[in-house]
Amino acid sequence: MVKVYKPGKVAIVLQGRQAGKKVVVIKQVDEGSKERPYPHAIVAGIERYPRKVTRRMGQKKLTRRSKVKPFIKVINYSHLFPTRYQLELEGLKGVVANDTFKEPSQREDAKKNIKKQLEERYASGKNKWFFQPLRF
């Protein structure tokens, strides 16, 4: 079987609270594990996208509107829809592991780290399509 969900692959969540949100695959588990006996992926996505900014807005308003709220989650492959896009994430690979989901403090630290990296990427202007919500 062809491996579709490689690290860096952008996908769309189909089921659950984050349905319709874009995510990027950090780690994939094709065979499943003991506690999750189905093929799944550890993903990081954007729960709240940055808002529109214009040239007339001040610096304070601009920084407030360009905030990102991320989420990390373990999602079954059947609840993901792969896209043709890739996102280079050198920094995200080491942030989230299987142990991250056991301890709430580790989860919060990982989310803060991901938030910082996503906001840097948004501010630099790379991958603008990733930071816009889907319209459907």
Image (cartoon, rainbow, N blue to C red):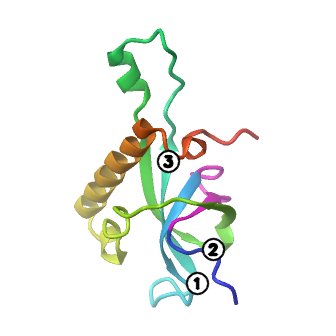
Dot 2 falls on a residue whose secondary structure is: helix
Q: Earlier in the sequence, mark 2 or mark 1?
A: 1
Give the quarter of the image for residue 98: bottom left
Q: Residue furthest right?
A: 136
Dot 3 falls on a residue whose secondary structure is: strand
Residue tagged by mark 1? 38
Q: Amino acid at mark 1?
A: Tyr
Disc marking residue 46: 3
Dot 1 falls on a residue whose secondary structure is: loop
Disc marking residue 67: none
Give the quarter of the image for residue 93: bottom left
Q: Identify the residue shown where x is 32% and y is 17%.
A: 60
Q: Earlier in the sequence, mark 3 or mark 2?
A: 3
Q: Residue furthest top?
A: 56
Q: Amino acid at mark 2?
A: Tyr
Label count reads 3
Q: Identify the residue shown where x is 68% and y is 72%.
A: 78
Query: Closer to the camera, 56 or 97?
Result: 56
In magenta, the rendered stretch is 8-21
Residue tagged by mark 2? 77
Check residue 117 for magenta coloring.
Answer: no
| 2 and 1 marks in contact (CB < 8 Å) | yes
Where is residue 53? Give x, y as percent. 50, 21
Principal secondary structure, stretch drawn in magenta:
loop
Where is residue 122? Give x, y as percent. 45, 40
Seen in the picture, residue 75 relative to 125 is either above or below; the reply is below
